[in-house]
Image: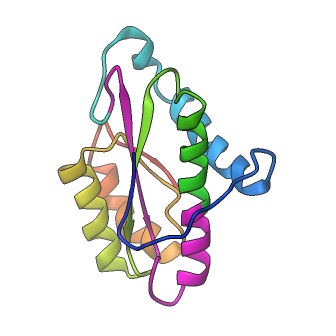
Amino acid sequence: MLHAEKNRGGTILDPNSKTASWGTLAISALLAASPAWAQNAYGPGVSDTEIKLGQSTPLSGPASAFGAGAGRAVIGYFEMLNAQGGNQRAEDQLTQLDNAYSAPKAVEQSRKLVEDVGVLAEIGTIGTVPNVAIQKYLNSKPKFRSCS
């Protein structure tokens, strides 16, 4: 199940495209960084049936043309992955929030993803402004992963 704050049109994603490799990179980084999954010692955002991931991206604001397109690519990738049986038999749950390419909004959305949604990782945050803004907050969460 995938969530987004803004309405998005359907996206067909070719698994051999450059945007698909972006999603593959994010999943690969999560799998490489999480040997605890093999030991059944699950952390926040992980269960036997689901892996919760989050993305804070500019769906509005000055970088929305790029952020909305990249955001649709990430959603399309996870829809394709889940249609193929999920990630190691667990379904990926992606929650996508709009940060409007604003530093304060990016921090607010990252907090929402970590504290309210309970994601394992935030993936694909676009731009220097949001990434610099969320760095201190995300680094203060010892079991949290950022793949941006």
Which quadrant of the structure image shows residue 25?
Answer: top right
Q: Residue at x 36, y 64 (%)?
A: 134
- Between residue 65 and residue 30, name the one nearer to us: 65
Question: In the orientation shown, which residue stands out farthest toward the right?
Answer: 16
Q: Residue at x 52, y 30 (%)?
A: 86
Question: Above or below — where is 54 with respect to 5?
Answer: above
Q: Residue at x 19, y 51 (%)?
A: 115
Q: Is residue 37 left or right of residue 137?
A: right
Q: Position of residue 6 (x, y in %)?
A: 40, 73
Q: Position of residue 63 (x, y in %)?
A: 54, 84
Which quadrant of the structure image shows residue 90?
Answer: top left
Find out whether residue 133 is within the magenta segment. Answer: no
Q: Quadrant of the N terminus?
A: top left
- Between residue 4 and residue 54, name the one nearer to us: 4
Q: Which residues are magenta?
A: 46-72
Question: In the orientation shown, which residue stands out farthest toward the left?
Answer: 116
Q: Is residue 78 visible?
A: yes
Q: Count of labels shown?
A: 0
Q: Position of residue 10 (x, y in %)?
A: 58, 63
Question: Above or below — where is 52 with respect to 139?
Answer: above
How is colour applied across the structure in the image? rainbow
